[in-house]
Image (cartoon, grey):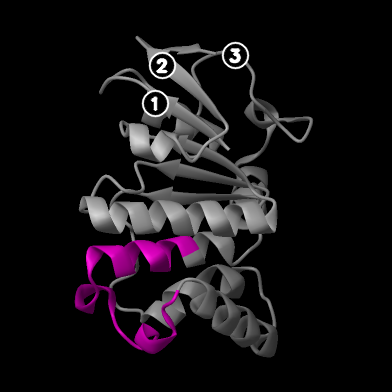
Amino acid sequence: MTAIMGPSGSGKSTLLHCLGGVDKADSGRLFFRERDMMQMLPSEIAGLRRTQIASIFQFFYLLPTLTVEENIEFPLQIQSIPQDKRRDSVASILKQVGMTNRKQAFPNQLSGGEQQRTAIARALITSPKVILADEPTGNLDSQNGRLILDLMQNLICAKGIALLLVTHSQEASAICNTTWKMQDGNLIV
C-alpha cells in the first residue's frame, strides 16, 4: 500500500490516470506485470481495467439509474460472469462493506459514506491485482473518512490487493506502508 502526496497540480491524478490506462503518457514506459502498457492495444488496456486494475474516486462515479446492488454487479456483467456467481459475489461484498440493507437504494438516496462504500465494493468485486484510489475520502467528513479508510485498509489487506493512493490527507497516507511525494510532475521516491 503506497500513498502519493503532493500539492494540487503536481501531477498525482495524471500519474494515476496513466497507470490505470485512462490516459496515455507523453513519454517513457509503463509496465504492468512485465507488459509494456505503452505498446498495448486499447482493447488490451480495457481488458486490464476490467480484470486487473480497479479505481476508486473522490466523486464515486456510481451509475445513477442503477441500485447499489446493480452498480456493484455491473463489472461482473461486463466480464460475462454467470448470474448465480454474480449474485453470490455481490451478496458477499455487500455484507463486507455493510451495505446489505441499502442494496436496493439508488445513489441519490445514499449518504457520501454509503456511496463510497458502494464504490469500494464495485472496485473489489472483480478481485483486481491493483486498486488506484484518487482522494477516496476527499469528499467526506472526517468521521466518514476515517471509517472509509479503515474499511479500505481491512478489505484490501485481507484480499492481498496492491493499493496506490493519491491523497492530500496525512491521515489517509497513514494507512499505507510507503509514502512518495510528487512535485512539479516528478515523483520523489
Quadrant of the drawing holding the N terminus: top right
Q: Which mark is residue 182?
A: 2
The first of marks 1 and 3 along the sequence is 1
Residue 37 pos. (x, y %): 66, 31
Q: Residues within 10 Å of mark 1 (few under 14, many from 20)?
A: many
Q: Are marks 1 and 3 in contact (CB under 8 Å)?
A: no
* Residue 5, quarter of the rendered image: top left
Q: CA distance from mark 3 to mark 2?
A: 17 Å
Q: Secondary structure at mark 2?
A: strand
> Which residue type carries mark 3?
Gly
> Which residue type carries mark 1?
Lys
Q: CA distance from mark 1 to mark 2?
A: 7 Å
Select label 3 or label 2 by which is in front: 2
Residue 50 pos. (x, y %): 61, 57
Q: Residue at point 35% right, 79% down? A: 66
> Is residue 6 rendered magenta in the image?
no
Q: Residues within 10 Å of mark 2 (few under 14, many from 20)?
A: many
Quickly name the residue at label 3. 28
Residue 186 pos. (x, y %): 44, 10
Q: Residues within 10 Å of mark 3 (few under 14, many from 20)?
A: few
Residue 88 pos. (x, y %): 64, 85
Quickly name the residue at label 1. 12
The first of marks 1 and 2 along the sequence is 1
In the rendered image, the vertical position of residue 41 relative to residue 140, given as above or below: above
Q: Secondary structure at mark 3?
A: loop
Q: Are marks 1 and 2 in contact (CB under 8 Å)?
A: yes
State which region is magenta.
Answer: 98-120
Q: Residue at point 66% right, 50% down? A: 52
